[in-house]
């Protein structure tokens, strides 16, 4: 086996990816977002509403909908 193999996904890289996604939600959509390790879903607070989705892209769509609907 060569040393050129891609590194395995570790908890550290998964945590770093989740942290990056969380920053993107804050910077782009101005919401607090987080990954729920017990539910396995993404969560955000958008305009006072709790929003949930299985994937970050789906959460972004739901946050945008909530922001448009309730502003």
Image: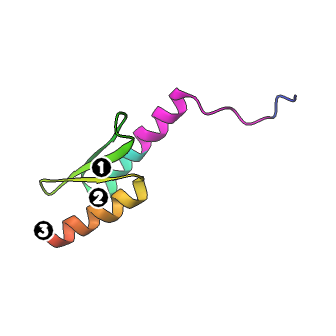
* Residue where numbered disc 3 is placed: 70
Q: Earlier in the sequence, mark 3 or mark 2?
A: 2
Dot 1: element: helix
Dot 3: element: helix
Specify the quadrant that holds the C terminus. bottom left
Magenta-drawn stretch contains 47 = no
**What's drawn in magenta, residue-wise?**
5-20
Q: Residues within 10 Å of mark 2 (few under 14, many from 20)?
A: some
Q: Nearer the viewer, residue 1 or 24?
A: 1
- Magenta stretch, overall SS: helix
Q: Nearer the viewer, residue 8 or 26?
A: 8
| Cβ–Cβ under 8 Å for marks 1 and 2 | yes
Q: Which mark is residue 29?
A: 2
Q: Residue at x 29, y 58 (%)?
A: 29
* Residue where numbered disc 1 is placed: 26
Q: Which mark is residue 53?
A: none
Q: Residues within 10 Å of mark 3 (few under 14, many from 20)?
A: few
């Amino acid at each position: 086996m060569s040393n050129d193999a891609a590194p395995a996904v570790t908890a550290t890289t998964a945590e770093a990816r989740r942290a990056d996604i969380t920053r993107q939600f804050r910077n782009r959509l101005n919401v607090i977002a987080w990954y729920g390790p017990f539910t396995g879903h993404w969560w955000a607070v958008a305009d006072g509403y709790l929003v949930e989705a299985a994937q970050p892209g789906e959460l972004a769509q739901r946050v945008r909908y909530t922001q448009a609907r309730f502003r």
